[in-house]
Image (cartoon, rainbow, N blue to C red):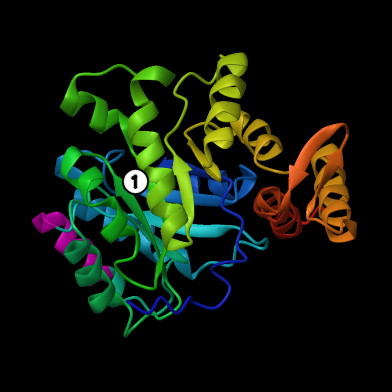
Amino acid sequence: MNRKKIVNHKSRNRRSIIFYSALEPKNWDNGVKSGADMFCLDMEDSTSADRKDEARKVCLPLFQRNVGRPAVRLVRINSPRSDEGIRDILAIRQLEAAPDGVVIPKVTSANEVQWVSDILAPHHPDLELVVLIENQKGLENARAIAKAAPQVSTLFLGYADFSGEIGSDFSLNSLQHMRSRIVMAASEAGIDAMDGPFFDPTDIEGLIEETKTVAAMGFTGKASYDAVQIQYIHDIFTPSAREIDHAQRLVAAIAASSTGQTRVDGVSVNRANLKTAHRTLELAERRGVL
């Protein structure tokens, strides 16, 4: 498939996404104030089954507001395989002012994403799609899902549902395989990879450890349910001055080498290391620190 990217999608920061219930209008202001790169009003897991229609009526009109800062405004719909999900999609299609993006939960196939795109894109062509992988079927099809439509900007691991399905806990070792699959699928498609949330807002050390680990694996962002976590997440997914300096010196050293192999800080490097260095510099520019 020819993945012609939507204007500005690639340049958006997606280090963090914070979720709030769609039932409370005040959560719009909470999202704006959170400092997260993306905030999401949640009509799925954070909305009880008997209040889905109420959630649509409360949250969707809020997207006519101007946030006053470059936050990406998202809404999480119900599964497109459900009646409520279909109602969500049709309601968004009818909006005059749509969200910046839609989070699609529990995706199992590329066809689901293509279907949502086919309905929404003619009416809201700049709307991006954040796709949640939360089950074994979705993980098996992750590569195709990541490339299912040009509006797909992010592949997002929802490991709470996934762990419940396979019977695992949330430890780093237990989730390593599924995380690796998400990163590889997102990288192949040229989109962002979002890790699921760290659920304990009081355990900052645990948050930092987990976020550093998934960043080292190749994730570009992490979800959250509490604004206290956002700055820690942003710091980890933003190249440091030291990392930027090292990348710049590595690029310069290899360019100056007659063989393409040299040493930087005493460590042997060659042209294969350029990909990592260029990635660091591209991220630094995207984050606004270069």
Q: Is residue 107 left or right of residue 24?
A: left
Measured from the top left, where is residue 26 in percent x and y? 49, 46
Q: Residue at x 20, y 24 (%)?
A: 164
Measured from the top left, where is residue 176 in percent x and y? 39, 27
Question: Where does the magenta region start and end?
Answer: 81-91
Of all residues, the one furthest to the bottom in this rendering is 122
Secondary structure that dominates the magenta span: helix
> Which amino acid type corresponds to the residue marked 1 in the rendered image?
Leu
Q: Residue at x 71, y 56 (%)?
A: 278
Measured from the top left, where is residue 31 in percent x and y? 54, 47
Q: Judge whether residue 233 is colored magenta.
A: no
Between 57 and 240, the residue placed more toward the observer is 240
Vertical order, 18 against 62 (above or below): above
Between 73 and 125, the residue placed more toward the observer is 125
Q: Secondary structure at mark 1?
A: loop
- Residue density around tag 1, few if under 14, some if 14–19, many if 20 or more, within 10 Å: many
On-image quarter of the N terminus: bottom left
Q: Which residue is mark 1?
A: 23
Looking at the rendered structure, the number of numbered marks drawn on it comes to 1
